């Protein structure tokens, strides 16, 4: 999936940043990880505001905030949902546990996992 040329408004992260995470998707762990994410966040995840596609039918993947946000202590890790048809970032579901771990790692070694 290529989103870095999409010109729709980027609700949560710049499209180029989102593309970095799409490019990192590991097919081997992807479906298990997304099942887990949907189990954890499926209830609260929004459906597409434009075409009403249900949250579970959207594209889900894990995203971390850009490096500059970790420097200012506002970084977040979570799951972004995309509607491929409408080219929209529909929802960003923050994972507090992963955010805490990443925050610690950023302070220790200044690296994103
Ligand atoms: Zn849609």
Image: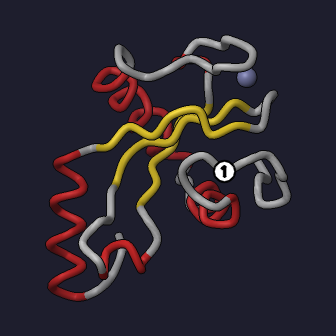
State whether residue 105 is above or below residue 23.
below
Which residue is at the front of the view, 57 or 72? Answer: 72
Residue displayed at 36% across by 19% down:
44
On the image, the x and y values in percent for residue 38 come to 39, 24
On the image, the x and y values in percent for residue 108 come to 15, 85
Number of disc labels? 1
* Rendering quarter of residue 89: top right
Residue displayed at 42% across by 78% down:
67
| Residue 34 in the figure: left or right of residue 98 | right
On the image, the x and y values in percent for residue 13 come to 57, 57
On the image, the x and y values in percent for residue 42 come to 38, 19
Instruction: Tell me the residue that label 1 is attached to.
Output: 10
Q: What secondary structure is marked by label 1?
A: loop
Residue displayed at 45% across by 48% down:
62
Where ligand 1 lies, by quadrant?
Answer: top right
Which residue is at the front of the view, 21 or 68? Answer: 68
| Residue 56 in the figure: left or right of residue 2 | left
């Amino acid at each position: 999936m290529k989103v870095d040329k999409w010109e729709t408004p980027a609700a949560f992260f710049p499209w180029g940043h989102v593309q970095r995470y799409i490019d990192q998707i590991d097919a081997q762990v992807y479906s298990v990880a997304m099942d887990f994410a949907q189990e954890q966040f499926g209830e609260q995840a929004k459906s597409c505001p434009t075409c009403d596609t249900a949250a579970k039918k959207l594209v889900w993947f894990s995203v971390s905030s850009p490096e500059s946000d970790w420097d200012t202590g506002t970084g977040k890790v979570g799951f972004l949902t995309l509607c491929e048809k409408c080219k929209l970032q529909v929802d960003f579901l923050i994972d507090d546990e992963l955010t805490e771990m990443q925050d610690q790692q950023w302070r220790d070694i200044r690296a994103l996992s």
